[in-house]
Image: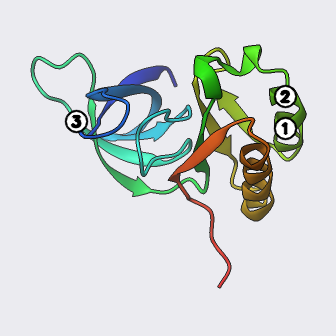
Amino acid sequence: MPQTKLEVELPESDWHNYGSETLWGTLIEGDIYQIDNVPVFAYGLSCGDKVRVVIEEGRAFPIVEEVVAGGGHSTYRLMMPSQRGAEHNPEFEKYWKPLEEIGCNFEGYDATVIAIDVPSQTDIYQAYSLLQAGEDNGVWSFEEGHCGHQLEG
């Protein structure tokens, strides 16, 4: 199936000052699409989620209205210090490699905000611990955009 750009409206009060974000999606059926990439700014969404969209006249892309089924992935954001992306941070590789080894991937290598995808089969507690280690060592700060994993207890 061909991919389509989808638009996610963002609260104007969010720290990044963007009014919307576009994501890639694949049509599943009718007005349901699956999110195919990692949201950088949107909260409550992860790669693999199925969403309902609406088409609004005058808008370039279908608008994500709601999540109808989670895909089991989680999304985190790394904020890189000093207005430099990961490619300009020699410590990034050292702290990123263990995350990559457990299945995580990212978008935004040259950016100061990097979106992390934690796949459904990855141990979320291990991933969180590795994200925390990077923050504790001043490589990045991070926040949770969405936890789609089943949590214990």
Q: Are marks 1 and 2 in contact (CB under 8 Å)?
A: yes
- Mark nearer the N terminus (3 vs 1): 3
Between 62 and 32, the one lying in front of the other is 62
Question: In this figure, which residue is indicated by the disc labeled 2?
Answer: 91
Query: Are there few (<14), some (14-19), or many (20+) residues within 10 Å of tag 1?
Result: some
Judge whether residue 122 can be spotted in this image. Answer: no
Quarter of the figure with the C terminus: bottom right
Question: In this figure, which residue is indicated by the disc labeled 3?
Answer: 12
Toward the left, the furthest residue is 57
Between 147 and 136, the one lying in front of the other is 136
When asked about the image quadrant of residue 7, the answer is top left
Question: In this figure, which residue is indicated by the disc labeled 1?
Answer: 95
Which residue occupies 79% across, 43% down? 137
Toward the bottom, the furthest residue is 153
Which residue occupies 84% across, 21% down? 90
Element on which disc 1 rests: helix
Compute the Cα span from label 3 to label 1. Answer: 32 Å
Give the image location of residue 111, x and y in percent: 59, 18
Give the image location of residue 2, x and y in percent: 49, 20
Compute the Cα span from label 2 to label 3. Answer: 33 Å
Query: Are there few (<14), some (14-19), or many (20+) residues within 10 Å of tag 2?
Result: some
